[in-house]
Image: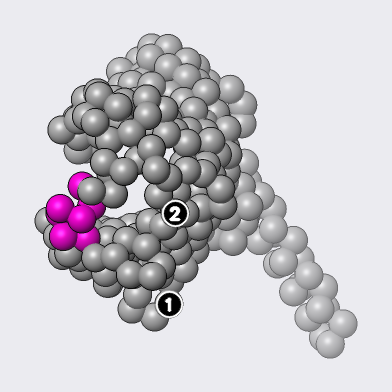
Amino acid sequence: MAETTPNLKQSLRKRAAYILAFIALSGMTFVLGVWFMFPDASLERRINAELARQAPFSFKIHHLERSFPFTLKGKQVSVDIPQFPLTIAPLQVKPAWSSLIRLQPGIVASGILFGGSFEVFYTSSGTTTIEAERMHLSATIPGFSSIRIEGELEYAQIDAHVSDAVTPSHGQIILKGVRIHGLDKVGLGQSVTNLGDLELTLEEQGHLLQLELQNPGGAFQLSGSGSITPPQLTPKARMNLQLRIDNIPAEYAQLEELLSLTGVRKDAEGYLIRLGGRIEHPILR
């Protein structure tokens, strides 16, 4: 009797293993059947309809394709954000297999934007990592359409938790060759102003999100620091930021005069601009 009991247990374990293997194989077969049953065009329409229903702005995928294992690729994706439309070409989305092994399903989205590349890693727990590099950025200043800021995003990496709000825990953004075009049209300097390189770091510290800005080189000596409370990037979050401007060249005397007229304080280390209030309603101090 003592000899048959281990054999019985071993037999039960084998049967259980066979059953689990059968269930896993059947489940995989079902998923593969569903995956390949729908034509690409039909799947594209279904996804776009779901995006139109849930996304806060227009989000449309063009020329959707599928590849194994379970990868979706859009030849072009249009994101119509008010005053800031984006075109991602292409965009690829696939399962994050490493997080699936840890029982935290996730996705990896990657694509080309502004001439550079990006990758977003997101899991069902909200853990998110964003990386981007070599993007050419260009934008006009709101209210001053003749003034344009250009530069290259050399590298950016942000770790955050995404749920109802975005809570960054750590981040670094490096901009190279930042330039302002058109200050001469409003009487504030030359046609092109070189701001040099900018590096912004983010770090969550308790109930604060600490920010620090460095500016090695450039026409001005810029430095910045401050915090956002709480560390979530929501419209109601409060800002306590300051930007210091020093070593203003003689050819930008009009800019220095403008800073004085607007009440920006000057001390031995230069002009100090303070920005407070909420993100949705900033206050210049």
Q: Which residue is drawn at 37% across and 63% down?
A: 270
Please tell me which of labels 1 and 2 falls first in the chain.
1
Would you identify the image quadrant in which residue 188 lies? top left
- The colouring scheme, among rainbow, by chain, secondary structure or one colour, is one colour
State the extent of the magenta-drawn residues as a range. Answer: 258-264
* Side of 265 where 18 appears, left or right: right
**Above/below status of 204 relative to 88:** below
Residue picked out by circle 1: 205
- Percent of width and height locating residue 239: 24, 66
**Up-down relation of residue 278 to residue 78 (above or below):** below
Q: In this view, does 102 lie to the left or right of 106?
A: right
Nearer the viewer's eye, disc 1 or disc 2? 2
Q: What residue is at 82 percent from the left and 86 percent from the top?
A: 1
Residue 26 visible within the image? no
Q: In the rendered image, which quarter is residue 102 located in?
A: bottom right
Element under disc 2? loop
> In the image, is 58 to the left or to the right of 8?
left
Q: Quadrant of the C terminus?
A: bottom left
Which residue does the image show at 42% across and 34% down from the upper left?
Answer: 193
In front of the other: 228 or 255 = 255
- Residue that mark 2 sits on: 247
Asked whether 177 or 103 is in front, the reply is 177
